[in-house]
Image: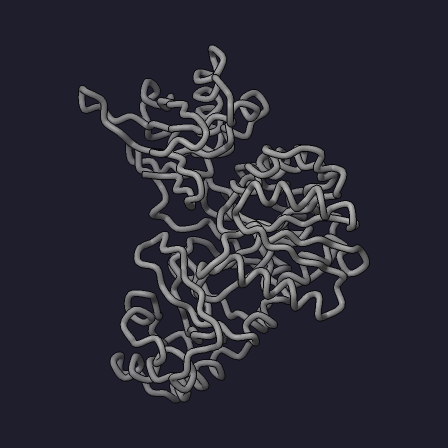
C-alpha cells in the first residue's frame, strides 16, 4: 500500500477527513506521511457525523457495532468489498487447515447481531466458499447448547470441524462437550491474547494433534476488521519464545508474551508510535494514521528469523514472507501493585498449569484491593469448573501456581513487591457466578 496515495484519496473523498485536516492546518497535498496528525476515536470518528466519515458522505451497505470495551459503543459501516479483502486473512488460516481439499464445517461461535464478530466472520467464510473452498457454514453464535447440538449432528458429514470464537468461550465449549477427536477439530480465535500453555491445554482437550497448525488467532478490530493472522510460522516462533522469557523480553521489551501475527503490507500500512500501533487502511470508514491504542510493534520477516536463528532455533514451518506485528493489547487492562504492572496474561498462565487446570475454567478477575488495615493485596477471583466443589488444598494450589508464574515471567513483580506481599489472595467462585462471571457477557479480566 502506498500510504501517501491513500491519504490523498481519503482527503479528496471523505468530508470528515477534509475538515479534520483543515482544523490541524494540514494541506491536502502534503507529501510527508509521517507529518500527518494521528486520528483516534476521540479526535476523529466520534467528532463527525457518521455519513461524513464515509467516502462521498454515503454510509456503506452494512453497519457493525464495536463491543464498547473502552467506553461507548461505536458504529462502523462495512461493505462487501471490505469482506472480500479481509477474506484473504481467513484464506491463510484455512490453508493451514488444508481446507482447500477437505470438506470443512465452519461453526461461527462469535455473538450474532449488531456486534462485529459473528456476522462479519460468517460473511468472510462465505467468500471462501465462493472462491472454491469446500466450506459449509453454520452460525449458532454464542449459544453453547446449540453448538453442542449441531456439531455432533453435522460433524460426521465433514472431514473436519472449525470452531471460530473468543478463546475463553471456545475453551468453555470444549470443556462442556466430549468426543471432539471424532471430528478433527480446529480452532480460530480473536479478541484476546492467550498463552502457549492455553494453546497446548485446549488442543489436548479438543483432540488437536498439532497445536501449531490446528489453532490460529486473528488480530482484528471493530474499526477495520482483521488486520493480521497467526500462521504456523508465527506460532512456531512464539512457542519457542514462550519457553524462553528472557529472549521474549529482549525481543519485545516486556515480560508479557504478545500475540504474534503476519500482515499484508499491500492492504494495511502499520507504523509504531511510542510502543503502540498505528495503521492506515481502506475500509467502510477509511482510516489514515489511526491510533488504536494497542501496545505492540513491528518486525520484518528477515529481522525476526535472524533473531531466532541467532539463538539456535530454525523454524520448520515455511510459508509467507510477510512482515510480523506483535500485539499486547491495551495497557488499561493492567493492575498496578507496588509499582509493578501485573498483566492478565501472567495470571492466565498460572491457571493453565497441569496441577490446577482441571479444577478451573481459566476465567478470573484481577484486582488490587485493600484489607481492613489498608494494606494493599493482589486478589484473583477464579471461576471453578461447572459442578465442581473444590477439594481441600485447591485454593492454595491455585495461589502457588499463580505466584510461580508471576515470579518467572514478571521481573517487575519479583523486584518491586515485598516478599511477604507477593503471594496473591485467591477467591474461588462457582461457574457462572453472577457478580464475577455472568453468563453471556464479554468477560473482563481486571477491575
Q: Would you say residue 128 is visible in this rendering?
A: yes
The mark tally for this picture is: 0
Location of the C terminus (image quadrant): top left
- 300 lies above or below 365: below
Front-most of 412 and 436?
436
- Residue 206, quarter of the rendered image: top right
- Residue 389 at x, y percent in the picture: 48, 17
- Residue 33, quarter of the rendered image: bottom left
- The colour mode here is one colour
Front-most of 336 and 302?
336
Front-most of 277 and 201?
201
- 279 lies above or below 317: below
Q: Residue at x 52, y 75 (%)?
A: 79
- 228 lies above or below 76: above
- Residue 121 at x, y percent in the picture: 57, 60
- Residue 32 at x, y percent in the picture: 41, 80
Q: Residue at x 36, y 42 (%)?
A: 334
Asked if residue 162 lies left or right of residue 403, the reply is: right
Q: Would you say residue 281 is visible in this rendering?
A: no
- Residue 341 at x, y percent in the picture: 35, 38
Residue most extreme to the top: 392
Asked if residue 117 lies left or right of residue 48, the reply is: right
Location of the N terminus (image quadrant): bottom right
Residue most extreme to the left: 373
Asked if residue 215 lies left or right of residue 181, the reply is: left
Residue most extreme to the right: 101
Amino acid at each position: 500500500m502506498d500510504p501517501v496515495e491513500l491519504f490523498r484519496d481519503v482527503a479528496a473523498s471523505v468530508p470528515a477527513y477534509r475538515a479534520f485536516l483543515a482544523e490541524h492546518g494540514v494541506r491536502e497535498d502534503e507529501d510527508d506521511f509521517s507529518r500527518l496528525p494521528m486520528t483516534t476515536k476521540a479526535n476523529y470518528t466520534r467528532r463527525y457525523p457518521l455519513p461524513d466519515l464515509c467516502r462521498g458522505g454515503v454510509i456503506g451497505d452494512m453497519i457493525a457495532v464495536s463491543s464498547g470495551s473502552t467506553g461507548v459503543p461505536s458504529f462502523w459501516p462495512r461493505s462487501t468489498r471490505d469482506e472480500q479483502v479481509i477474506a484473504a486473512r481467513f484464506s491463510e488460516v484455512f490453508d493451514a487447515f488444508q481446507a482447500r481439499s477437505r470438506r470443512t464445517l465452519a461453526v461461527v461461535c462469535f455473538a450474532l447481531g449488531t456486534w462485529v464478530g459473528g456476522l462479519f466472520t460468517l460473511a468472510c467464510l462465505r467468500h471462501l466458499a465462493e472462491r472454491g473452498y469446500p466450506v459449509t457454514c453454520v452460525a449458532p453464535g454464542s449459544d453453547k447448547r446449540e453448538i453442542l447440538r449441531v456439531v455432533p449432528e453435522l460433524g460426521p458429514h465433514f472431514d473436519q470441524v472449525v470452531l471460530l470464537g473468543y478463546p475463553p468461550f471456545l475453551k468453555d465449549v470444549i470443556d462442556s462437550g466430549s468426543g471432539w477427536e471424532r471430528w478433527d477439530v480446529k480452532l480460530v480465535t480473536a479478541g484476546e491474547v492467550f498463552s502457549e500453555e492455553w494453546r497446548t491445554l485446549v488442543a489436548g482437550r479438543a483432540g488437536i494433534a498439532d497445536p501449531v497448525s490446528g489453532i490460529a488467532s486473528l488480530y482484528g478490530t471493530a474499526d477495520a476488521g482483521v488486520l493480521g493472522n497467526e500462521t504456523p510460522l508465527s506460532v512456531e516462533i512464539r512457542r519457542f519464545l514462550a519457553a524462553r522469557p528472557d529472549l521474549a523480553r529482549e525481543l519485545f521489551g516486556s515480560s508479557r508474551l504478545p500475540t504474534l501475527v503476519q500482515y499484508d503490507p499491500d492492504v494495511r500500512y502499520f507504523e509504531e508510535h511510542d510502543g503502540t500501533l498505528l495503521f492506515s487502511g481502506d475500509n467502510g470508514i477509511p482510516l489514515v494514521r489511526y491510533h488504536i491504542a494497542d501496545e505492540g510493534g513491528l518486525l520484518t520477516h528477515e529481522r525476526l528469523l535472524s533473531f531466532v536463528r541467532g539463538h539456535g532455533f530454525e523454524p520448520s514451518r515455511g510459508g509467507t514472507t510477510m512482515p510480523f506485528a506483535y500485539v499486547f493489547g491495551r495497557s488499561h487492562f493492567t493492575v498496578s501493585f507496588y509499582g509493578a504492572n501485573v498483566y492478565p496474561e501472567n495470571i492466565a498462565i498460572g491457571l493453565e498449569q497441569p496441577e490446577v487446570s482441571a479444577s478451573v475454567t481459566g476465567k478470573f478477575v484481577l484486582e488490587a484491593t485493600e484489607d481492613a488495615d489498608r494494606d494493599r493485596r493482589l486478589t484473583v477471583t477464579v471461576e471453578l469448573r461447572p459442578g465442581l466443589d473444590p477439594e481441600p488444598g485447591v485454593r492454595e494450589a491455585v495461589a502457588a501456581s499463580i505466584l510461580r508464574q508471576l515470579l518467572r515471567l514478571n521481573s517487575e513483580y519479583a523486584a518491586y513487591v515485598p516478599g511477604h506481599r507477593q503471594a496473591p489472595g485467591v477467591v474461588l467462585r462457582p461457574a457462572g457466578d453472577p457478580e464475577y462471571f455472568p453468563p453471556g457477557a464479554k468477560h473482563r479480566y481486571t477491575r
